[in-house]
Image (cartoon, rainbow, N blue to C red):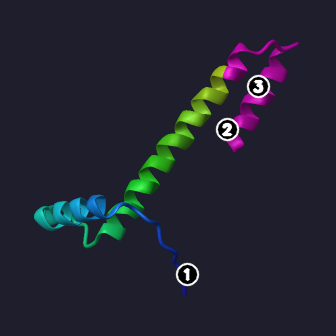
């Protein structure tokens, strides 16, 4: 069985989210926790993508001795 932990948010913010979820059942969220889990997953995905773009830009701007060295660095970034 998966273990869970809690994340604290301000009471007013929690109340606002709870009200929003109840007023919009068509969105499919049954609780603030469900909404928060999806929001965190989506934001984490965005951040990972942004980090890859930044790393690739950094690689692009680095001086390399030859093309093979540049491609090897590129492949290593994509493996992360």
Question: Which is the main secondary structure of the residues drawn in magenta?
Answer: helix
Q: SS at mark 1?
A: loop
Q: Residue at x 46, y 56 (%)?
A: 41
Q: SS at mark 2?
A: helix
Of mark 1 and mark 2, the one earlier in the sequence is 1
**Which quadrant of the rendered structure holds the N terminus?**
bottom right
Please indicate whether residue 69 sits to the left or right of residue 36 in the image. Answer: right
- Mark linked to residue 3: 1
Q: Position of residue 28 (x, y in %)?
A: 22, 66
Tag 2 residue: 78
Relative to residue 32, is residue 59 depicted above or below?
Answer: above
Location of residue 13 by image quarter: bottom left
**Which quadrant of the rendered structure holds the C terminus?**
top right
Report the span colored magenta: 58-80
Tag 3 residue: 71
Residue 76: in magenta span: yes
């Amino acid at each position: 069985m998966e273990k869970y932990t809690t994340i604290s948010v301000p009471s007013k913010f929690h109340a606002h989210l709870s009200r929003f979820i109840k007023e919009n059942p068509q969105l499919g969220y049954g609780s603030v926790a469900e909404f928060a889990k999806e929001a965190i997953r989506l934001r984490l995905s965005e951040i990972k993508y942004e980090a890859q773009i930044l790393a690739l830009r950094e690689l692009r701007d680095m001086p390399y001795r030859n093309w093979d060295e540049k491609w090897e660095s590129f492949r290593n970034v994509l493996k992360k």
